[in-house]
Image (tube, rainbow, N blue to C red):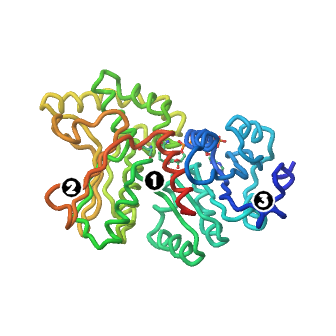
Amino acid sequence: MSVSQATLSPNPTTSRSAVPSLSLYLAGVGSVGTALLYQLSEFQGDAKRPRLIGACTSTHAAWTPPHPTPGAVKHHLEHGSTLHWPAVLERLIEHAPRPLVFVDATGHPDVADHYTTLLDAGIHVVTPSKLANTRSQQHFDRLHAIAAEHNVQYRYETTVGAGLPVVRTVRDLRATGDGIHTIRGAVSGTLTFVFSRMRQGDSFGEAVQTAIKAGYTEPDVRDDLSGEDVARKFLILARTAGASIERDEIEVESLVPESLRDLPHLAFRRYVHKANDAWRERAETAASQDAVLQYVGRWTPGSGIRVGVEVVPADSDFGRLQGQDNLFEVTTNRYAESPLTIRGPGAGPEVTAAGVLADVLATEA
Ligand SMILES: NC(=O)C1=CN([C@@H]2O[C@H](COP(=O)(O)OP(=O)(O)OC[C@H]3O[C@@H](n4cnc5c(N)ncnc54)[C@H](OP(=O)(O)O)[C@@H]3O)[C@@H](O)[C@H]2O)C=CC1
Ligand SMILES: N[C@@H](CC=O)C(=O)O
């Protein structure tokens, strides 16, 4: 069965003007996508519940009935058609009801490639994926320009801090004319989690495996352990604050030993324990100084971005972080004496999906 023959109710070709509520297409039904489906099915907010019109995984696509449960969507997908992006895009652009939000919960670069086409067609894009925003500065600017030109929204709150209000805070500081002096943050839920589990006795490898199971990691955990995820988040914050900066200007410290860097993803996961001894020694050295390891980033306009492992006092705000917590400290003209601080879980399917849903609802607010 081809994508265009799959079930969609009501018929998209006749429904555009008859369907006033917000329609939603979901690309990616993994940790975040599934949590979003649960939140949609249990939705009790003040706004109208967004209407899921279709979904896809890396292999399958299906057009779904109104108010589907997560189980029904997955069943539909299993029995749906083979994913063929040109057919999905054609249907979204030519036939799907408006207003329409495309949610990218895939973390795949091929899907990030479609944002310009979707925005250009008057479709809002909401994404927790950092990939599109961390290509060239020119691409970042282009996405915003196309959205503005077509009067649609490009929202990416959950790319930094998951459900925490970090991107909007930076945007508001900029919009209200404040000047950012520096942003310092522990912005990887996975790395905070790994270091805090090691303090409780886990090996590095065990802590990484637990983070994967909990759904805190990127689809490829090497993006977390290499520091790339943190570099991307700081790039997004700096660009959102108005800086013009490229990825290759950022200094990044990797947690992955040289010997494991070239392994394919699944082999890497099998051999990650080979880094246990090196990280145990660094953690013990820190502990002997009443300190802990924390992966910290800093952006200072004019001096750029640096991300890497820091030894921080155990009895400090950064040292006390536990679980998948993030901590952001923003020092500005107005927050000069004491930084504006945002803290809380910065990874995990539920908080991320909630942030995505808030972005979806905000498109029509
Ligand atoms: N997990 C978290 O705490 C957070 C995640 N994010 C971001 O959310 C996004 C999703 O993360 P997560 O849910 O953990 O990832 P998962 O790996 O759990 O899920 C990814 C989903 O995307 C699908 N997919 C992959 N490639 C394609 C493709 N080319 N076309 C269509 N579908 C595709 C996968 O399909 P299949 O099922 O076939 O494999 C899967 O359903 C990522 O960008 C991540 O950075 C952001 C903040 C926090
Ligand atoms: N893998 C990320 C998820 C959120 O972006 C993290 O661990 O912080």
At which x and y percent is residue 101?
63, 59
Question: Closer to the camera: disc 1 or disc 3?
Answer: 1
Q: Is mark 1 within 8 Å of ligand 1?
A: yes
Kindly identify the amino acid type of the residue bearing the numbered disc 1: Thr
- In-front residue for pair 50/243: 50
Q: Image check: 17 left or right of 2?
A: left
- Foreground of the two, 33 or 112: 33
Coordinates of residue 122 in the picture (x, y in percent): 65, 70
Q: Where is residue 211, by image quadrant?
A: top left
On the image, the x and y values in percent for residue 313 come to 15, 38
Between the C-alphas of marks 1 and 3, the distance is 28 Å
Q: Nearer the viewer, residue 39 or 89?
A: 39
Residue highlighted by disc 3: 87
Q: For mark 1, what is the residue?
A: 159
Residue 219 appears in view: yes
Q: Position of residue 186 (x, y in %)?
A: 30, 46
Q: Quadrant of the C terminus?
A: bottom right
Most foreground residue, 101 or 188: 101
Q: Which residue is mark 2?
A: 339
